[in-house]
Image (tube, rainbow, N blue to C red):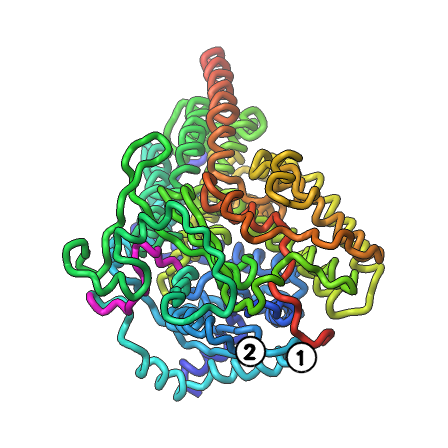
Amino acid sequence: MPEVTVLPAGWALAAAALLGLLAAAAACFDGYLTARTTGTSSSGLRQPFGEVARLMRQRRRTTVAADGLLWRIGGAGLLLMALMIITVVPLGRWTLFDLDVGVIWFTAMDVLAWAFVWLTGWGANSTHSLVGGYRFLAHGLAYELPLMFALVAPAVGASSLNVGKIAAAQQGLWFVVWMPVAFVVFCLGVLAIAVWGPFSPALGADVAGGVTAELSGVDRLLFSGGRYALLAAGAAFAVPMFLGGGSGPLLPAWAWVLIKTLVLLAAFVWLRRRLPAVRPDVFMEAGWIVLLPAVLLQDLIVAVVAAARS
Amino acid sequence: MGLSEALGRIAVRHAHVLVAEVPGHWLTRAAVERHVLARGWRLALSPADADILAVCGPPCPHLSEPLHRLWEQLPGPRARIQLESPQAVLPALLAAEQDLLDLTRQRADSRDRSPDHAAPGQAQPGERHPHEGHAPHEAHGHDHSHERPHCGAEHADHGGGDGGHAGHGGMGHAGMAHGGMDMAPGGIPLAGGGEDRDGLEMDLLHLRLGPVLAYWPAGLVLRCTLQGDAIVDAETSLVGVDDPAAPAQARPASEDPRRFAARRCDNAASLLGLAGWDHAASRARRIRDALLFTEDRDGPARELHRLRRMVGRSRSLRWSLRRVGPLDVQQTADRDLPDAMTGDVRDRLLAMLDRAAGGIAGQRPTGPSSGVPVDAIPDLVRGWDLATARLIVASLDLDPLVVDREVTHA
């Protein structure tokens, strides 16, 4: 069984850079897909870089009686969350933070999205922003519990909350194979914390951009970058939890982690084009009536199997 | 070459454009959207996200104030262009690009701007009131009806919303003349309260949708009174519409079926965009562009058929839109709405696409007045939340509120 090596803290910068690369790859892919449907002459692959240049050049703006401090905290928070999440994700043999309760760490981080997205909506003191913020909370009420119970399944299956140990427990069979419901619910949760695809009503066109309606310049850059980073971090976290971590033929473990992350990330990005937004009130029904019982049943099955094994 | 110039050069290749349509100039808007997207630029949803403000149509005195307010909200570097016909679009976009790159000019612009409109106590009259809301677009809902006549009709059925306004000393300027008694430090009057559906006291917030808003019928203003995000009361008015009798009712008998179909596609694109399905919205928009700016007939028909099939088959769209804004036969009859309006938002979307297909096939639009009167809107949106109300308005498949004033074909 491969031992996990904890790297010195200085490597955190490299991890952050890697997360940045993954987020940039996701944004490039999204730009490419968008360019294809809108019929743009260019490939759209350079879209994210142009967007960064544009937002770096744009002035920050503020609104009347804005809650400046909370607004900025919310806007920068998503990126921070993503960085925190990847500290516990092992890249093959290496990890930054070999936490015994790594799964709880992820959960603690993903709950922060509630605060950060809502604060971004609140801070601008603008009706549309605030409506967007509350829409996110409504989505949160529906996705959060199923997401947490989905994370219980691999933890029970591996009898550990340590992300490295959970990855190691999948040497024979990946958890995604016998915990498909938990995996799907986890993916939905990741889309939701990144306010992505079907979970984007908080940023909807019907509320003029919602939470982002009043953001400009570097504030908007941090928020949008944070969303891509969260998507990437969520995909990276799914790899040790459900997709067997670094296991795979020929290539070294770290390469397999990256490949699996990129494939899942591409699937997330692609999904946005396929699905319309899900209105929070409708999703509330699905979250409580379908997802939660389904994922609890999944947990039960996993628990019975785990008990029978030991 | 300095770093900022290099940055600027990359940045303008990805400019975001906020499109403001003067009623009667939707063809110009369509041309702007088409050129913007073809260049790899993006359409902005709010002024905060925009670099370029593109006004489609000649200046209208009653829109100048809202447009000025909108312009003030662009963060900068910024450029403003005025387009009077679809042919003028491309040169104007190129000019705007140059304008964004002109550092001297942008510096002067940012120096001369009114100091950040956020400074406490300096809020411009009528701007960003909490009771007016101040999300991006409704900010222009600044209403001058008490100063000069509207260019359009002001058929406001003043309902219960009045109580709310009165509590703040009227709208617009008057609100600022108010003493300090119900002012927050920002110079903003506090929201008044009212009973909600359950009889509990809840804040009333006044929000204006329109006249300039993405995926919104140009010239229409919907003044909503919100509790939370539920619309408890609403009233409509029109801005920039000359002939109050004209809107929506009388469709010119000689209307080109192709353009009729294009308008349906445009409305479908709005509805799909509001439903958060950008992919389908882009496809509807491309069909519209093909109908308006090319002579091709089979291509758009085929594409429309595919889109209709994709939208019809989408389970998640059905699930998300079901039971939204339902109207039965009785209700449509009572409100003088066309029969095509029965069903929920999804049914109306599919009917819209079918009408578009009929238009491409050369069928003349039927019925002398198949449009929805704008007066009916408040009644339809009351009780729904903001997002649903937007979907309902978009599902009404409104014709332009003014007969097209443009020269056709770019």
Query: Which residue is under mark 1?
Result: B87
Whether residue A132 is visible here, answered yes or no, is: no
Chain name for mark 1:
B
Residue in the image at 38% along x and 58% along y: B135
Q: What residue type is labelled 2?
A: Pro
Q: Relative to the observer, which residue lies in front, A93 or B4?
A: B4
Q: Quadrant of the C terminus of chain A?
A: top left
Residue at the limit of the structure toward the top, as seen here? A308
Tell me: residue B118, above or below residue B110: above
Query: Which residue is under mark 2?
Result: B58
Asked whether, in this view, residue A310 is left or right of residue A7, the answer is right
Magenta span includes B129 = yes
Asked whether, in this view, residue A177 is left or right of residue B112, the answer is right
Chain name for mark 2:
B
Residue in the image at 58% along x and 78% along y: B83
Q: Which amino acid does label 1 sit on?
A: Gln
Marks 1 and 2, how far apart at CA? 14 Å
Give the mark nearest the N terminus, 1 or 2: 2
Q: Relative to the observer, which residue lies in front, A34 or B69?
A: B69
Residue in the image at 63% along x and 52% along y: B279
Magenta stretch in the rendered image: B121-135
Magenta span includes B320 = no
Asked whether, in this view, residue A87 is left or right of residue B94, the answer is left
Indicate the secondary structure of the residue bearing disc 1: helix
Whether residue B244 is visible here, answered yes or no, is: yes
Asked whether, in this view, residue B337 is left or right of residue A164, the answer is right
